[in-house]
Structures are given as structure tokens and as C-alpha cells.
Image (spheres, rainbow, N blue to C red):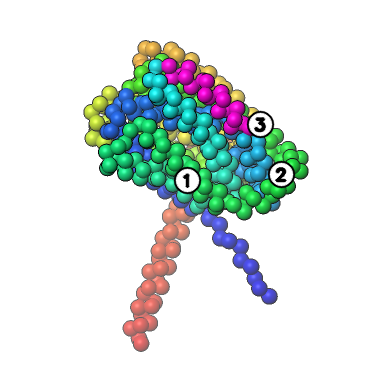
Amino acid sequence: MAITKKPRQLSMVQTIFMTSVANILIMAVTTLTSIITARMFGATGKGELAAVLFWPAFISGLAAFGLPTSLIYNVKKNINQLPTYISMSFAVQIPISLIAGIVSWFGISFWLSGYSESVVSIARWYTVSMVPVMLFMGVLAAAAQGTDKFHIYNLSRLFAPLFNLVGLVLLWITGILTVERAIIVSFAANIFVLICYMYAMRQQIFSSASKLVGQFRTCIHLFSYGIRVYGVELLGTLYNHFDKIIILALLTPKDFGLYSVVFALSRMFNVVQTAITNVIFPKVAGMEQQKVLTLVGRAFRISMVLMTIIIIPSMLIGRFFIGILFGPEFLEASGVFYLLSMECIVGGGSWILASAFNALGRPGVIVLRQIVALAVTITLFFVLTPLLGLYGIGLALLLGSFVRMLMSLASVSIIFKMPMHKMLYNKEDITFLKERLREKNILKGAGKDAKRKRAKDSSHG
């Protein structure tokens, strides 16, 4: 009788480590890309490029309607319906893309009124073309996460910036790099990644496409959860991008160029926390409440301690690297870099906590949190930006992140009856880390013992 082995699945710690490595590589590639474009275009040109690239990510975030998160949640409950969920998500997002394209075509000219006509025209065409691409990629990324195919998920996230960097380097070497050509390279890189995604997930995409008409009733719960979680994601998108909208409306292209560089550089402190957020929700969805809170709480505490240890020396040398890598012109925004670095860690921790509410089917709690934090942050934007410029943007974001974290901790205590101090400190974390280290030492010791045994046997003939 043949015995069929199940494919080996990575543990949560292994998956987080793999995703963290991918995030580090993505951050390295993105930083190199930022250095090249900053050196070639200067602060003003960098701002024009960033303004064009900003809109598709922002609008696709508004138009996703919670479908990627809902797909992850529902696949964990019924993996057999994955092809149905993917095909129905695609069918819904096609008309959404058309509507988003029409709105963005007319809206972009209003928000980019301080930019040249050529930049506005490029931004229009790029946004209309990229929004459906990014929506489809979001669904396929969720399908890969929901089925624990994190190798596909991580490789696909790495390929887009990597191929974009290769294209920019080739144009730079040949001396024909311009803002317009940089946009074309970015578009081509994302199209290539979408094709790779579709090829990797081809079986799940096409196996039920022929039965699409009769699948809507099956997907009622997919759309129901998507609408419930959409409030969280909509507010999260607004929170993550409203700083750019304010800069586009109130400040100059040079300010946007300075900000885009230091903002991207500050995100390197969020590598581990982003990996945890991407991994922990698919892993804990469907678990019992106590297990979810235990795993999410441990991930939150360990990540906050780890990133605080890392950020202190990194911030001390940050100004030096900004001048060396991007040029003296960008040192003007080094103070904003410090504020954004601290905000990155606090905000990253708050999103890890949000995973517990989404996994336990309580996304409405995070909606309320985001509404309050967004209201506070936007108010501070309009108060502080005219007074302090980019420093006002950074300070507003930092204070808003503290509001999100405090509300998340208070909600865990009130709703799930877990004392706040247990989410902030648990001595079992030290035991957990010791066990992980001990396991590695045992593995290393076992390998050394095996080598000694083989050496001894060979010496005796």
C-alpha cells in the first residue's frame, strides 16, 4: 500500500524568518532604486517621480474592498473553494478597476495642480493602467498567503522592485534615464510579476472559471467578510497615504522628493514587524481565542524589543548615510527621518495587534481604532504642516501611531478580558526564546556528534 506524504509546511517562526529575509532584500533593492533616482533627478525630479508612482498604490488600496483579507480568512475555513474565490474576486474587480480609472483620471489633475502638465499626463495614464494590475496581484498574493505558499508570495514581492532596479540601471548606464522611462520600467516590472503570479497559481485560477455564473451564492460569505474588514483597510490606506496627499496639496515637488527618500529609508525598521503581520494572520485565522492572543501578544512584544534595540544605533548614523548615499541636498530632511523611524516601529506594533481582532472575526474594533487615529492625525496634519513643514508631518504620524497602539491594547483588555500588562510583558517570552536557542544548539550539537562518530569509525577502518 502506497503511503502519500503531505507536503512539509514551515512553522510560523520559520515562515516569519523567511518573510523577514525577503523584506530585507526588498528593502535593499528599494533603497538602491531610491539612491539612483535621487542622484539622477535631484529632490524635485524625485518628487515628480514619487508623485506619479504614488497614485496606483493609493487607489488600489481604496478599491480592494477587503477581498484579499477576506480570501485569506475564508480559505482557512474552506480551502476547496479557493478557485471559486479567486475567479469571483477577479470578476468583481474588473468593473471596480474601470470605475477607479475614471475617477482617478479626473481627480489626479486636481491633486497635482502644482506639477507640470507632462507629469499630470503621465500620472493619469500610469494610474489607469496599474490599478487593475495591483488589484489582481493583491488577490493572488492573498491566495498564496492563505494556502501557506509563502515562497511564491515572497518571490513575487521581490521580483517587481528587482526587475525595476535592473531596468533603471540599464537606462542609467546608457545615459537615457528620464522620469518618463522610469515610469515605463516600473509598469513593465509589475506586468511581469503579475504574469508570474498567474502562472504559479494557474491551477487555482482556471479550474473553476467556466462555472463562474453559478458561484455567486457560494461567495456570499467572501464578500460579507470583505465588506466588514474593508473599513479597517480603507482607514489603514488613508492613514498610510494621507501624509503624501497633504504634501502634494500643501507643499512643493521638492518637499515630496525629500520626504519620499527619508520615508522609504525609515521603513527599513519595519522589516521584521511587516513580516510578522503578513504571516501571523494567515497562520492564526481560525484558531481559538486564547491561542490567537498568546501568539499575537508574543509576536508583538518580541518585535517591539528587537526593533527598539536596532533603531537606537541606526538613528545615530542615519544622517551620515543620508548625505553619503543620496547627496547633501537630502540632509535637509534628516530630522524628519528620526521621527518617521520611531513612528515606523510604533505603527508596526499596532498592526501586529490588529491581526488578533481580524483573526477572531472582530474587524469592527480596528475600524473604530483607525477612525479615531485618522481623525487625530489629519487634524494634526493641518495644524502642524503649515507651521513646521515636513517636521509637522512626521510628528503628526508619530502621535497618531501612539493613539493606534494604546487603543489596540485597551481593546484587548476590554473585549478579550486580557490584562494590558500581559500584552506588554510576559516572562514566558524569555522561556520561549531560550527554547528556540536550545533547539538550535541541540541541532548543532547533534551535527557535531555525528561528525565525530563518522571520524571515529573511519579511523578504525
Discs 3/2, front: 2
Q: Is residue 114 visible?
A: yes
Apparent side of residue 19 relative to residue 452 in the rendered image (left or right): right
Overall secondary structure of the magenta stretch?
helix
Which residue lies under the disc numbered 2? 212
Three-letter amino acid code at disc 2? Answer: Leu
- Measured as percent of width and height from the top left, residue 128 is found at 52, 30
Apparent side of residue 188 relative to residue 89 in the rendered image (left or right): left
Q: Are marks 1 and 2 in contact (CB under 8 Å)?
A: no
Discs 3/1, front: 1
Which residue lies under the disc numbered 3? 227
- Measured as percent of width and height from the top left, residue 355 is found at 57, 38
Q: Secondary structure at mark 1?
A: helix
Which span of residues is magenta-colored?
95-113
- Residue 107 tag number: none
From this view, report whether residue 313 is shown above or below residue 246: below
Seen from the viewer's position, the closer of residues 295 and 119 is 119
Which residue lies under the disc numbered 1? 192
Mark 3–mark 1 Cα distance, whole angstroms, equals: 30 Å
